[in-house]
Image (cartoon, grey):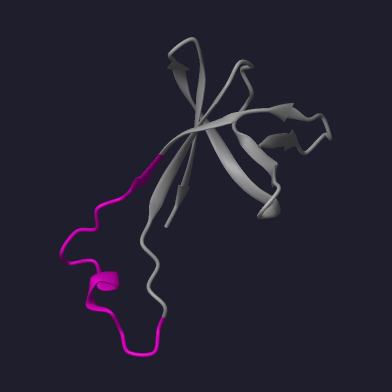
Amino acid sequence: MAISPIDGNTVEFKLAEAEAIELHKRDGRLRGNVGSVRRDPFTLVFILDLLLPQQLYVLHNEVLGDVTIGLVPIGPFDTSYGYEAVFN
């Protein structure tokens, strides 16, 4: 995958983790309203050999195309830097 900061530079990165977020039993999304689409929250962790600031980035994937998401640096990840995106 490729990531492009809003300023237009492009770098390659790798998806390291994808994890579902466990909902609390009192969360309304657990009740499954009839006729509504329920989406479970999840996090994605990417790794990159470059330290980037927290901001919106355009991710390009051959299947999904271009998607703009917010990435937050989460510190060192093995020998690279980790970035997290949360979807809820």
Give the answer, above or below, for where 82 lies relative to 34: above
Query: Quadrant location of the N terminus?
Result: top right
Prevailing secondary structure of the magenta residues: loop
Tell whether 1 sits left or right of 21.
right
The front one of 54 and 77 is: 77
Tell whether 51 sits left or right of 9.
left
What's the magenta region? 18-36
Tell whether 53 sits left or right of 28.
right
Q: Magenta span has 39?
A: no
Residue 78: x %, y % from top left: 43, 13
Which quadrant holds residue 28?
A: bottom left
Identity of the residue furthest to the front in this view = 63
Tell whether 78 sits left or right of 32.
right
Give the answer, above or below, for where 48 lies relative to 22: above
Counting every numbered tag in the picture gives 0
| Residue at the (24%, 66%) spot, across then down | 27
| Residue at the (39%, 90%) spot, across then down | 35
Residue 56: x %, y % from top left: 66, 42
Which quadrant holds residue 52?
A: top right
Give the answer, above or below, for where 82 lies relative to 60: above
Identity of the residue furthest to the right in this view = 8
The front one of 67 and 16 is: 16
| Residue at the (42%, 57%) spot, across then down | 88
Identity of the residue furthest to the bottom in this view = 35
Residue 2: x %, y % from top left: 70, 35
Q: Magenta span has 21?
A: yes
| Residue at the (61%, 47%) spot, across then down | 69
